[in-house]
């Protein structure tokens, strides 16, 4: 039995769809983060989302966590020592047996009962930095975060703020504790449930772990900014290479099974255009006119798809009969 905790969330729905594509929709147990039953739809049929309790969890072989940090930790306490966990919420990061996973970056098989899927922004940054034509001396990564990273509540707050501003009404500020509509945020307000600095530090930790596993890559300088967009990460990379590289060399080096590269004759990729696509799209690659070895790279990724695809790559070795 495969269980999804938080199956009613945006991330949970993306995960359910992916599991269905891999042939596991009929063996899914949908578990909510609340202590009550609810009804949803699965494969065109009504499906019940059951409460979070020990009996259902202990009968599971594999548990995906896609709800809240709190629901993940509660599930881990209730499940006993049999089920394997794939955590997409980072709630089990501090568990001694937890292993950080990003198969798009590192294909090494890991034996553990707890797999924490790396933050999608860390995975994206590691993919770009590990596919450069020459080693980097230094790099700067500016990350633009979408409202959907704060779940449905974040999307609704951005939507409500936008309409309220246009109608000259008072804005709702429960999630960001600041004006995000028509605005960029370097920090949330002090009463926000989760601070932007906390997310930035998690990306930093995960990225440091991922690039330490491969070839020698210096840790980049990283800055996270909250953008007034609903979905999809955008990244601006500045990289100083050890030797001069033209744009064509950078494009050829980046192009891989996980990175689609758009050359100058195509429109630059956007967070809207990447929705539903696997991996990254990179483009608008330009030399730094003020630095002979510097290069600019723009990249975008669907935040949920990147996270879920990595989770499925982790799970595939545990799911006999999974469709690729």
Image (cartoon, rainbow, N blue to C red):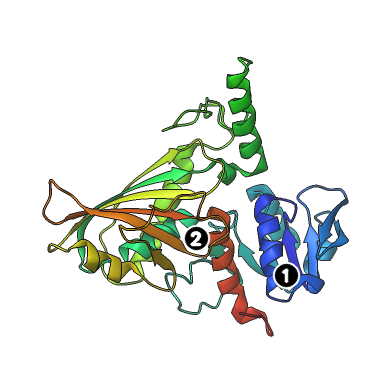
Is disc 2 surrounded by few (<14), some (14 to 19) or many (20+) residues within 10 Å? many
Mark 1, mark 2: which one is toward the viewer? 1
Return the residue at label 1. 20
Of the numbered discs in the image, which one, if any, rests on residue 84? none
Please name the residue shown 66% across and 49% down the image. 68
Secondary structure under the numbered disc 2 in the rendered image: loop
Q: Position of residue 114 (x, y in %)?
A: 59, 67
Image: 27 above or below 191: below
Which residue is at the front of the view, 120 or 86? Answer: 120
Return the residue at label 2. 118
Secondary structure under the numbered disc 1 in the rendered image: helix
Please name the residue shown 42% across and 53% down the image. 269
Q: Position of residue 18 (x, y in %)?
A: 66, 67
Q: Position of residue 266 (x, y in %)?
A: 37, 57
Q: Quadrant of residue 148?
A: top right
Q: Quadrant of residue 247?
A: bottom left
């Amino acid at each position: 039995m495969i269980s999804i905790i938080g199956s009613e969330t945006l991330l949970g729905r993306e995960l359910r769809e992916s599991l269905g594509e891999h042939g596991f929709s009929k063996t899914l147990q949908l578990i909510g983060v609340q202590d009550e039953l609810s009804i949803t739809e699965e494969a065109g049929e009504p499906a019940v989302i059951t409460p979070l309790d020990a009996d259902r969890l202990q009968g599971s072989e594999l548990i995906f966590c896609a709800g809240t940090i709190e629901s993940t930790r509660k599930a881990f306490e209730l499940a006993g020592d049999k089920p394997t966990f794939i955590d997409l919420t980072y709630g089990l990061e501090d568990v001694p047996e937890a292993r950080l996973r990003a198969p798009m970056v590192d294909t090494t098989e890991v034996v553990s009962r707890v797999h924490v899927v790396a933050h999608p922004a860390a995975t994206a940054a590691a993919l770009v930095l590990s596919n450069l034509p020459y080693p980097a001396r230094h790099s700067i990564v500016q990350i633009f975060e979408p409202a959907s990273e704060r779940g449905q509540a974040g999307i609704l707050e951005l939507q409500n703020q936008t309409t309220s501003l246009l109608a000259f009404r008072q804005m709702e500020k429960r999630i960001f504790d600041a004006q995000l509509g028509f605005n960029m945020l370097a920090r949330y307000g002090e009463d926000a449930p989760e601070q932007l600095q906390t997310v930035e530090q998690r990306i930093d930790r995960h990225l440091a772990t991922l690039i330490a596993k491969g070839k020698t890559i210096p840790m980049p300088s990283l800055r996270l900014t909250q953008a007034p967009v609903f979905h999809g990460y955008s990244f601006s990379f500045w990289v100083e290479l050890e030797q001069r590289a033209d744009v064509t060399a950078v494009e050829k080096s980046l192009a891989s099974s996980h990175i689609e590269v758009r050359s100058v004759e195509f429109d630059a990729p956007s967070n809207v255009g990447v929705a539903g696509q696997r991996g990254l799209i990179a483009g608008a690659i330009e030399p730094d006119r003020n630095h002979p070895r510097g290069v600019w790279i723009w990249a975008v990724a669907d935040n949920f798809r990147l996270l879920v695809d990595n989770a499925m790559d982790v799970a595939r070795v545990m799911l006999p009969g999974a469709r690729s």
